[in-house]
Image (spheres, rainbow, N blue to C red):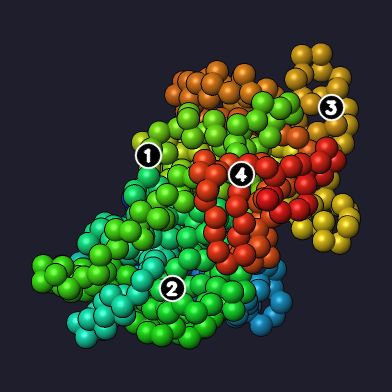
Amino acid sequence: MAKMRAVDAAVRILEKEGITCAFGVPGAAINPLYSALRARGSVRHILARHVEGASHMAEGYTRAQAGNIGVCIGTSGPAGTDMITGLYSASADSIPILCITGQAPRPKLDKEDFQAVDIASIAKPVTKMAVTVLEPAQVPTVFQKAFHLMRSGRPGPVLIDLPVDVQNTEIEFDVESYAPLEPYKPRATRVQAERALEMLNAAERPLIVAGGGIINADACEELVDFAEITGVPVIPTLMGWGSIPDDHPLMAGMVGLQTSHRYGNATFLKSDFVFGIGNRWANRHTGSVETYQGDRTFIHVDIEPTQIGRVFGPDLGIVSDAKAALEAFIEVAKEWKAAGKLTDRSDWAAECEHRKHHMLRKTHYDEVPLKPQRVYEEMNDAFDRDTCYVTTIGLSQIAGAQFLRVYEPRNWINCGQAGPLGWTLPAALGVRAALPDKKIVALSGDYDFQFLIEELAVGAQHKLPFLQIVVNNSYLGLIRQAQRGFEMDFEVSLAFENINAAEKEDSDAVPGYGVDHVAVAEGLGCKAIRVKSPNEFKEAFARAEALMEEHQVPVVLEFILERVTNISMGTEIDNINEFEDVLCLDPNLTLESGWVSMRGEGKVSASDNGGTKAA
């Protein structure tokens, strides 16, 4: 046993729990913790420009690599409230991050002291635990419990609030005897696995829906093994994208109202059985439950018991960690395959793969200003299989999910449920801090980029290079498209005449497009390139790579888009508006359940590029 301040014990626990990096902003009420971090020198600290940015950096850090837990630190009052968005985003996607805040001294907690707020009560709905530690001797056990909770069951964030006098109080702590607690993870039983395989065997056109829980559980190899043994095609959710490579014969496409593939929706509508593993039936994936369920049979496997039946009741629910469940399913499937008991799925798998290669959306446009589809086509050509994409909500994310290709787990890092604007840039910095040798490409619309644009300076200061793609139509594009239903275009335009850009003789800023992102990025210590024409793509990508390598800072690559492009989406998975041309390489391909033959005949109007279904 040794005497030390409570914060010195906390830092030693961070070390024991494997923490090597934290993101934050110091302040008076958290300075004792910073003094402990400085004294030990074991945890790298990256100074954010906004405390919300620090929370998203912690998210990116966790999401980048199995086993990571991102840490974000802030002072009392507004620092904690600023980090609520990050806690919500992490909670919604089952991402463990640890938020540590300073607090007014205990005697002042009920006296409306400067920057004293009950942050634990504010954070409770979006965390697994939020606590203000009132007894210094409890600091070690509260941190121990925090890590245990973050790793157990459905992962999620924790907030620990430390009054400044608690931080400075000396306690007895035996660092040598400290050990992390074993996380709790439920496991599927043999009986459950056999029942699931019996139901799967009885189906004619089954699909596996692979959710983000598979990636969280580091179970992607097991997913692919199970799909290959059974021959069942896989539909990844947006959070599960990358759990099976896009070019795998059994990868059948994504399903949903927005971030989906035409062939994915078409295949799902033909299915009669859905085996959901580590997913939560999110509404952007399902649309209405009535259409999604149809006459299909469902199995739902989830680590959190209360997720089973939350959206709709499955025919079989299994509470289990995704990796443990897949191991049990594989064991039974291998035995049955050896005994000749597994149903042959080759015809169904071939039918799904045929749709995958023939039901496509057009991407090759030569127009100026650029069409976004062409940008994603060029990104697929420019970036290799191991590229990691980071993005949030918006038409940029939706089109990215429709057109990009992902081949590895954790190569699509996306805040799927909360979707806060501004998330992309700081999250990409967190990913870079976790993966110093990875090719990282962040994807933002112009509004997402502007939300937390100051965090570019963090990348410049701390030498955290990544490529920031900005697709700029000078609009809140997704909201503009949603306003079509109200027959309005109201307060969603970001366009204005930038007088400074107009006065610069050497400026290549586009008149009327508002913010000069290149100038802002350069002012924050980064490099930036603007692309206006399709014939500039290849040189721009090559130059951006060279600038990152030379300067080790973020490089912004801005693409000037046409102002209005409606991206394919709809109200139901069987009612998707294909605003742009669609391709069908098989003129005989027809689909049931409300689909019609698609022969690339969808037309667009000059003013608002369509509004009817391509047919």
Q: Residue 50, image x and y in percent?
A: 63, 51
State the residue in front, 586 or 221.
586
Does the CB distance between marks 4 and 3 fall below 8 Å?
no
Q: Give neighbour class at mark 2: few <14, some 14-19, many 20+ (Cα, 10 Å).
A: some
Residue at numbered disc 2: 272
Eye-nearest disc, 1 or 4:
4
Which callout, 4 or 2, points at the residue further toward the start of the chain?
Answer: 2
Disc 3 crowd rating (10 Å Cα; few below 14, some 14-19, many 20+) is some
Question: What is the quadrant of residue 241 in the picture?
Answer: bottom left
Look at 48% across and 73% down and name the residue there. Answer: 280
Q: Which mark is residue 386?
A: 1
Along the polypeptide, which appears first: circle 4 or circle 3? 3
Question: Disc 4 marks which residue?
Answer: 599
Q: Is residue 286 above or below residue 570?
A: below
Q: Is residue 131 left or right of residue 480?
A: left
* Tag 3 secondary structure: loop
